Image (cartoon, helix red, strand yellow):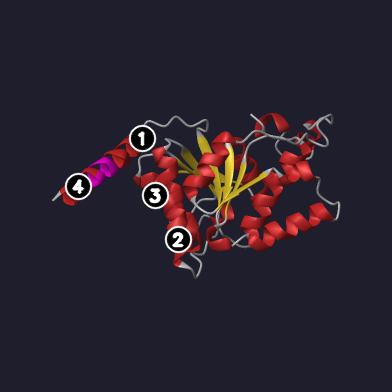
Amino acid sequence: MENQQLHHLHYHLQHQQQQQQRQANSMMKSRFRRVCVFCGSSPGKNPSYQLAAIQLGKQLVERKIDLVYGGGSIGLMGLVSQAVFDGGRHVLGVIPKTLMPREITGETVGEVRAVSGMHQRKAEMARQADAFIALPGGYGTLEELLEVITWAQLGIHDKPVGLLNVDGYYNSLLSFIDKAVDEGFIAPAARDIIVSAQTAQELMCKLEEYEPKHSGVASKLSWEMEQQLGFTAKSDISR
């Protein structure tokens, strides 16, 4: 009888703690207003990738963070955007006009912003975001991820860059980057630009606490040259 009462008390306390945690999450004030998510336009073969996209969307909703992404409703892009939209947060899809036909990308939820091409798409997503997160994806995801890492290394922005390493999907990429550090092609301080975690909740916590430790290698240069070359200036991306 006594054991049963103890078990009941333990269950009650555990339930109470879970409720308090949920309340704390719902009251959480994030440092970010909007996060840019890079991810695949395919769902991937492992269902854990799809689950991670939905969980990331729910994390953004819990923290009252809006989403900017590459538009469309297919693959992981569709899952994360739908989760954020269903949670009542603002969704901004930035998409080149050539990719806008519904048969190519599906129907975007939330606000759609059409741009002239891929360079403008990346620059607009970067301008709108306070942080970046990459879910599993292919060439496009890697290209977007590595570009914002490079911009951080150059001092164009100091926004956090997160890697959601679902089931070790990005282990080989992280190993390659460590190899580049060992071989002298990436500075050890620049390795810290990448924040990685296996779950959406852990990654968001790390990004909230992130403080830049590197110094932009070209921070003394005037990034106004980018604007003259037809790209977005530092002042826009680093706002």
Mark 3 Cα-neighbour bin, 10 Å: few <14, some 14–19, many ≥20: many
Residue 83 marker: 3
Q: Position of residue 71 (x, y in %)?
A: 51, 51
Tell me how far mark 3 sits from mark 4, CA to CA.
Answer: 35 Å
Q: What residue would you read off at disc 2?
A: 50
The earlier-in-sequence mark between 2 and 1 is 1
x 62%, y 56%: residue: 141
Q: Amino acid at mark 1?
A: Ser
Q: Main secondary structure of the magenta part?
A: helix
Q: Is residue 5 left or right of residue 107?
A: left
Q: Is residue 97 visible?
A: yes
Q: Amino acid at mark 3?
A: Ala
The earlier-in-sequence mark between 3 and 4 is 4
Residue 13 within the segment the image draws in magenta: yes
Q: Nearer the viewer, residue 235 or 135?
A: 135
SS state under label 4: helix
Q: Position of residue 188 (x, y in %)?
A: 78, 45
Residue 114 marker: none
Q: What residue would you read off at disc 1?
A: 26
The earlier-in-sequence mark between 2 and 4 is 4
Tell me how far mark 1 sits from mark 4, CA to CA.
Answer: 27 Å
The earlier-in-sequence mark between 2 and 3 is 2
Mark 4 Cα-neighbour bin, 10 Å: few <14, some 14–19, many ≥20: few
Q: Are marks 3 and 4 in contact (CB under 8 Å)?
A: no
Mark 1 Cα-neighbour bin, 10 Å: few <14, some 14–19, many ≥20: few
Q: Position of residue 11 (x, y in %)?
A: 24, 47
Foreground: disc 1 or disc 4: 4
The earlier-in-sequence mark between 1 and 4 is 4
SS state under label 1: helix
Mark 2 Cα-neighbour bin, 10 Å: few <14, some 14–19, many ≥20: many
